[in-house]
Image: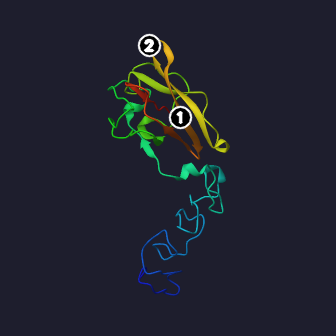
Amino acid sequence: ECGDGYVNEGVEECDDGNLVATDDCTDTCATPYCGDGIKHEGVEECDDGDADRNNGCDEMCIAHGDPQCFLPYTSLNLANRNVNSMATVICDQNAADGQFNGLQWYRFEGAAGTHMPEIVPPIYSCGTHAPGWVNGSHPGLADGVVSRQVCFNWSGNQCAWNAQVDIVACPDFYLYHLPNAPVCNLRYCGTD
């Protein structure tokens, strides 16, 4: 049987004695190959199951995109972080929402949206008093990590407070290196 360490001719292509899908022999005892949708450690940089190099992984299983895109990040996916939410009042200076926890890389996804807005959200949106937005444009894939200003809208001033952040475009998403908000109650917002 697959995983017993013996190659059964005509039934298995390989058998490395385990059922680990990401090593030298897959968990179905097939020889791994670029394009099978499984990233094989030490053999491939990536494997997304296709030959489209525009989504970060090419036909040779070589990753395309900034190296930061392939490092760990924290997901911001709560619905109350979306610009359409007017619920609760949370500040991005502490771990009040269970996700934001100070200076690190974050990705907006799920109900929070896919990226930070480039237009000014109304006050009291995204679960805070003064919502944060990118004052400028997001980078392209070839731009690498760029510095941008995030402004926080409050009391008729679209940039009452601001913070310098780093942003990198990854295939299909953005990553943001976000510091604590300058004061409370300010929050980084997401949109679709």
Where is 160 relative to 112, above or below?
above
Quadrant of the image occupied by residue 122: top left
59, above or below 155, in the image: below
Whether residue 161 is situated above or below residue 49 in the rendered picture = above
Task: Tell me the number on the disc at residue 152.
Answer: none
| Type of amino acid at the residue the image marks with label 1 | Val
Mark 2 — residue?
155
Q: How many residues crowd mark 1 within 10 Å: few (<14), some (14–19), many (20+)?
A: some
- Viewer-side residue, 64 vs 143: 143
Residue at label 1? Answer: 165
Q: Amino acid at mark 2?
A: Ser
Residue neighbourhood size for the residue with mark 2, other residues' Cα within 10 Å, grouped as few (<14), some (14–19), many (≥20)? few
Alpha carbon of mark 2 to alpha carbon of mark 1: how far? 23 Å
Q: Would you say 143 lies left or right of 188 here?
A: right
Mark 2 / mark 1, whichever is N-terminal = 2
Q: Tell me what residue is drawn at x 38 percent, y 32 percent.
A: 93
In front of the other: 174 or 6? 174
Q: Secondary structure at mark 2?
A: loop
Tell me which residue sits at (47%, 32%) in the image. Answer: 190
